[in-house]
Image: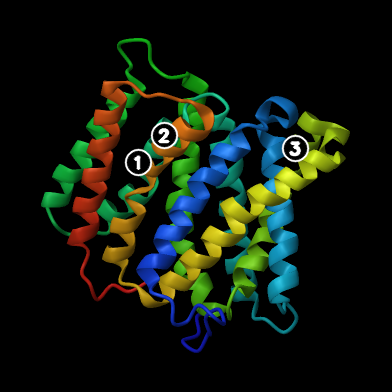
Amino acid sequence: METATARGLPGLDRAPPIGLVLCGVTSIQFGAALAATMFDDLGAAGVSLLRLGFAAVILVVLSRPHVRGRPAVELRLVALFGLTLGGMNLLFYEALDRIPLGVAVTIEFAGPLGVAVATSRRRLDLVWAAIAALGIVLLANPFGAGIDGVGLVLVLGAAACWAAYILIAQRATRAYDGNQGLAIAMVVAALVPLVPGIAQAGTTLLEPQWLALGALVALASSVIPYSLETEALRRMPANVFGVLMSLEPALAALAGFLVLSQALGARDLVAIALVVCASIGVSRAVPPSAEA
């Protein structure tokens, strides 16, 4: 059940939505790079558990969401929102443990790009889709020394979750005030990596250094970007939001290079550029009236 009266976040209502998205995109990619530095000690699922767990605690404390008295349809909506968030994060981190950050984010971008093309009625968008597919094939390099096969499957699963996230997030942000819907969803999301996270990291999760880094990753990769994005989604046309989000693969490649020393070859950079251009082309074709 959607409501048109849901209020945004106090203090951000006057912030330019474009600035909110750019800050969110930058934060989430450098947060992902920081998370990758923890994989050797905690495993991808362990880091995912710390990120989502701390994000859930922080968001619940800040927003104090109300669950009692909510219609069942709204509770189901936010639970589904949480499952997509949890699945997207766990699958992406497991993929990131096997393939470079810039490559992983670029392939994952097939999710939102696919949603844009599927909901479009323009034939030109099929051309953009073909360009993006070419970029992804170049990254996968199936006829050469391609990327890790398991990593490719995992990141494609994350892409599917991202597509579902886009379709669900708009409804969820309209049904809950501020960050209440996101907070409830994050609690559900933290349950997704619970078992594999404990299995991989065990009691190492409780060591102070990893708890501190986990909290930092949660802020950079979940609390800050999701809060900024959900606020921007209330006031920004879908096409503008899509164009800005199209910068993610490029920023991911930059974060991977600066934080993880993951230098990409010329073929990879061309592939990323193809996906970014295709995403911008599709996003600019979305009617400005289609507000998120």
Percent coordinates x, y for residue 56 in the rendering: 71, 60
128, 266: nearer the viewer: 266
Residue drawn at (84%, 42%), measured in percent from left and top?
A: 208
Residue denoted by label 3: 197
Q: CA distance from mark 3 to mark 1?
A: 29 Å
157, 257: nearer the viewer: 257
Residue drawn at (64%, 81%), measured in percent from left and top?
A: 71
Q: CA distance from mark 1 to mark 2?
A: 7 Å
Percent coordinates x, y for residue 57 in the rendering: 75, 61
Residue drawn at (32%, 74%), measured in percent from left and top?
A: 291
Percent coordinates x, y for residue 5 in the rendering: 50, 89
Q: Amino acid at mark 3?
A: Gly
Which of discs 3 and 1 lies nearer the camera? The answer is 1
Residue denoted by label 2: 102
Q: In the image, is residue 167 above or below residue 248?
A: below
30, 84: nearer the viewer: 30
Q: Amino acid at mark 1?
A: Ala
Q: Tell me which label, 1 or 2, sits earlier in the chain.
A: 2
Q: Is residue 174 visible?
A: yes
Q: Tell me which label, 3 or 1, sits earlier in the chain.
A: 3
